[in-house]
Image (cartoon, rainbow, N blue to C red):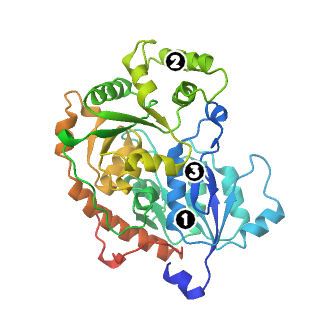
Amino acid sequence: MSETSQANGRKPHIGVLMPAGKVINHDHVVTHTFNDPQKATQLFTNIGDCFVYESSLRILDYAELFPIYAPATGDLTEKQVDKINTLDYIFLRGSNYINTNGQWDPITRVLEKTKVPVIAFGIGVQVPDNSEEYVNESTKRFLQVVADRSVTLGVRGELSRTALKSIGINNVRVFGCPTMFRHCKPSLNLKRVSAGDIKNLGFTLRRKTYGFATLQRYMLRTLADRYNTEILCAGELEEKTIFYANRKQIPDSEKAMAGAVKALVEDKWIYGAEDPLLKLYLSSLSVFETVQDFEEAEQKLDAVTGFRLHGNLLALANEIPALYVTYDTRTREFVKTLGIPFVDGRHMDRFSFEEAWDSADFDHFEKTYIRRFGELKAFLEENSMAHRLGGDPTPNLIKAA
């Protein structure tokens, strides 16, 4: 518990803007399709958003959590406004809020009608390579309201800091993402394993990664030939359909399976019913509707690699080594902020997973983690957010990574 919470003798009542998933048992998050395979095959839910949300709740110390959704039309009722104004603060869960496509006016109207502090908890930028345009007017107005109502904004990395600086926001602290710190440990000790000793490998799938489909297929196929590989799906509809249809957990399973395979063929991801990748899907694909289940699956692995930013991050948070494949400004910002070993997907023409894995510097990651933990703790305390972080890496000893 933070000094603020100890001083006032009560746990805060807090709100969350645009929660991802449903909360059960105080701080466990499940998808909106939890326990409903049929619905899961029809509604895309990125469980990575649930990772960030649940991790935020595990870090924060609170008595009540109040979800806040912006009405698509109209405004909040007076009763809703009155309720929000009783809260100690509202937090904005980590996501890609800094971009040129955001339409945040309904949320901004919500914030302008209330008066409690609004705190950005691990937000980041998502823009094309070499872009110097970071926001549109809707995004700019939204972020400025948030900045005016908090001591500092917690952001992913230096590119996010640069983007905010371009619109006059300088009260920023860089720490990465709440998912990294979900177990509230001041340090991590990853389980070292050489490439030759890996038995169970997790591959975090992100099929819709423009320009990297061939590379991702190649990695899946070759790694599965070498290791017992589990494909970890974050929410793609066709993959979920194959998973549930293969287990006869949805109506008309054969028809659903055929439809999903047809869609993947049209997407040029697989090449028909005899494609070895489809056979790999049928034997090794995993789908999760709770953060806890995804986490437990990764805890059984020796190593993780792949394209899912938060899938890899969750492994590292559980002291399972992960090698990132970076493919955009967002993933490159993450690995730089947290010192995570990576290979750049743009430069993998001649690639050996074994060589990349055995040369990965996990010592650097562990040292960087300690520094960023201190930044996170400083961010929480300067914004009067009661927390559950342990240890004592004091803010005034933190140096930029």
The structure residue drawn at horizontal position 45% and vertical position 12%, both measured from the top left corner, is 272
Identity of the amino acid at label 1?
Ala
- Counting from the top left corner in percent of width and height, residue 316 is at 35, 53
Q: Residues within 10 Å of mark 3 (few under 14, many from 20)?
A: many
Specify whether residue 18 is in view.
no
Position of residue 232 relative to residue 350, above or below, is below
The structure residue drawn at horizontal position 53% and vertical position 82%, both measured from the top left corner, is 4
Q: Secondary structure at mark 1?
A: helix
- Counting from the top left corner in percent of width and height, residue 314 is at 41, 51
Report the residue marked by disc 2.
261
- Residue lying at the far front in this picture: please name it: 248
Mark-to-mark CA distance, 2 and 3: 38 Å
Mark-to-mark CA distance, 1 and 2: 46 Å
Q: Nearer the viewer, residue 347 or 246?
A: 246
- Counting from the top left corner in percent of width and height, residue 88 is at 64, 74
Position of residue 157 relative to residue 117, above or below, is above
Viewer-nearest of discs 1 and 2: 2
Q: Residues within 10 Å of mark 1 (few under 14, many from 20)?
A: many
Viewer-nearest of discs 2 and 3: 2
The structure residue drawn at horizontal position 75% and vertical position 50%, both measured from the top left corner, is 71
Q: Secondary structure at mark 2?
A: helix
Q: Report the quarter where the C terminus lies.
A: bottom left
Q: Nearer the viewer, residue 166 or 109?
A: 109
Position of residue 39 relative to residue 102, above or below, is above
Q: Residues within 10 Å of mark 2 (few under 14, many from 20)?
A: many
Position of residue 77 relative to residue 248, above or below, is below
Mark toward the start of the polypeptide (2 vs 3)? 3
Report the residue marked by disc 3.
139
Q: Secondary structure at mark 3?
A: helix
Report the residue marked by disc 1.
147
